[in-house]
Image (spheres, helix red, strand yellow):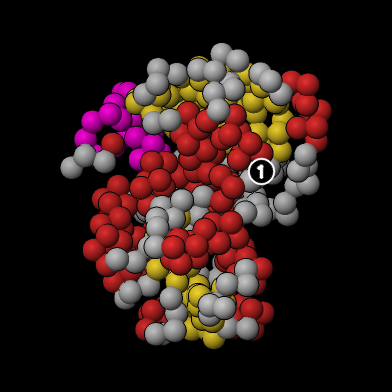
Amino acid sequence: MTDPIRFGLIGCGKVAPRHAQSLTELPDARLCAVADVIESRAQRFAKEYRADAYTDYRRVLERRDVEVVSICAPSGLHAPMAIEAMQAGKHVIVEKPMAMSLRDADQMIATERTTGVKMCVILQNRYNPPMQDLRRVVDEGKLGRLLLGNATVRWYRPQEYYEDGWHGTRAMDGGALMNQSIHHIDALQWLMGDAASVFAYTGTLAHKMEAEDVGVVAVRFASGALGTIEGSTLTYPENLEGSVALFGERGSVKVGGTALNRKVLWKVAGELEHEHVLLTRDQVDPPSVYGTSHHHVIADMIAAIRENRAPRTNGLEARKSVALVLAIYESARTGKPVDMTTGSWNGAH
């Protein structure tokens, strides 16, 4: 029997328990060190998960027994922390979005290559059973040629959410599209294929913050299909919808729920007779918008290390949604469409 892979965790905020709990569920993993700039939070977290606590994340990187580091710090710190961890010889799991710029994302990918370690990004909703079913029917061609795709995030955040010093800032967080909508945007391009161009409007209409609290986007995909993205944090007084819908020549589907975990519409050629069964499977909502599939991402990372292969949600995969959001921001800034088939948007340098 092989020894468990030992993990460190940086940042003990809201999403960190999803990582820590997932590690307790995986017999092949052990959390042994955590770090947070707030000492009391680090100590509480470490006590709950039986790990050592630090206020300086570099102490975690210095530990020779730590093989993998999960980065749950504010988004603007993802790139520098991930690069430093990889340079210290650690495999890295980083929360979404992987970076706030394509330059940083590309530097992360380059560092992974030069150091020989592995990096994956938390795109956990791809693993949800309804999303896996949706990917299957797309891959099997059961929807026929995809014609239209839609991602909708109608969520609410009170003003207090943006008063912690980093949420809603352009440097550390982004707005409703880069933060709250990134999973749905990732899912849309994962299913519909690469985006070729975007035209967008964004606004800051209901909050005092740097970044946007609403964005509406028209997308043309490389396949010729069209799409729309709507993301916001202004649907007072609560989250109303987070969904991805696809419309093809032979089928129409929509996955929603708290965390892309419910089949809302399932009209698929060859499966119509099972529609009731399909719509009633997996209908238990998770306790939060983070969902319950973090452990699948972490389990895949452990397998990738053991098998010496790339993780499924690797840096190149995660870069795509960052590129799409940044193209949306550029279109909103300039008032012009952005061609994503040229330049840095498509990975060219």
Overall secondary structure of the magenta section: helix
The residue at 59%/47% (across/down) is 127
- Image location (x, y in percent) of residue 207: 54, 44
Up the image or down, 281 lies above or below 158; here it is: above
**Image quarter in which the C terminus is found:** top left
Q: Which residue is mark 1?
A: 129
Residue situated in front as seen by the camera: 100 or 117: 117
- Tell me the element at label 1: helix
- Asked whether residue 231 is in view, the answer is no
Left or right: residue 26 compared with residue 74: right
- Image location (x, y in percent) of residue 319: 37, 46
Residue situated in front as seen by the camera: 271 or 239: 271
Up the image or down, 20 lies above or below 140; here it is: below
- Asked whether residue 292 is in view, the answer is yes
Left or right: residue 61 compared with residue 275: left
Looking at the rendered structure, the kind of residue marked 1 is Pro
Is-magenta flag for residue 8? no
- Image location (x, y in percent) of residue 35: 49, 78
Magenta region? 323-345
**Image quarter in which the N terminus is found:** bottom right
Residue situated in front as seen by the camera: 123 or 152: 123
Q: Number of marks in the image?
A: 1
